[in-house]
Image (cartoon, grey):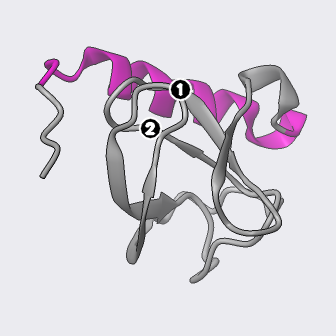
Amino acid sequence: MKRPTGKTLTTQTEARWCPNCFQLLTAYTALTDAVKAEPGDFTVCIGCASVLRFTETMDFELSSLEAIPTHARMQFARVVQAAQSLPSRPIRIT
């Protein structure tokens, strides 16, 4: 995992489901200058604030803050806190 740079970049991606709340996720925001997520990178579900990790097939698996490298853990904890403070909204399944 690359070190956080303080810059963020949101990238549209193929739709994937959160394995915890089944929110359909269509984008991710990088905390580094990386343009593209790679297997082993982490993200946070905007629906339930779960820490997710990209698998080798670029699906999501549940993870935890403890699994995130120490140098990025504090910044990720702030992202999780921000996601937890968002108002709940119903999941739309079409």
Kind of residue indicated by mark 2 = Cys
Alpha carbons under labels 1 and 2: distance apart: 5 Å
Residue 50 circle label: 1
Disc 2 element:
loop
Q: Is 69 above or below relative to 27?
A: above
The N terminus, quarter of image? bottom right
Q: Residue at x 60, y 80 (%)?
A: 36
- Determine if the magenta segment contains residue 75: yes
Q: Residue 8 in the image: x percent, y percent?
A: 45, 64
Which residue occupies the foreground of this view, 58 or 71? 58
Q: Quadrant of residue 91?
A: top left
Q: Residue 55 in the image: x percent, y percent?
A: 77, 57
Residue 45 circle label: 2
Q: Residue at x 41, y 26 (%)?
A: 21
Kind of residue indicated by mark 1 = Ser
- Determine if the magenta segment contains residue 76: yes
For the record, the magenta segment spans 69-89
Crowd tier of the residue under label 1, counting other residues whose Cα lies within 10 Å: few below 14, some 14–19, many 20 or above: many
Disc 1 element:
loop
Query: Counting residues from the N terminus, which is met first, the one under dot 1 or under dot 2?
Result: 2
Q: Is 45 above or below relative to 32?
A: above
Q: Residue 75 in the image: x percent, y percent?
A: 61, 36
Q: Are marks 1 and 2 in contact (CB under 8 Å)?
A: yes
Q: Residue 69 in the image: x percent, y percent?
A: 88, 39
Q: Quadrant of residue 10?
A: bottom left
Q: Quadrant of residue 47?
A: top left
Which residue occupies the foreground of this view, 32 or 16? 16
Left or right placement of residue 14 versus residue 57 in this view:
left
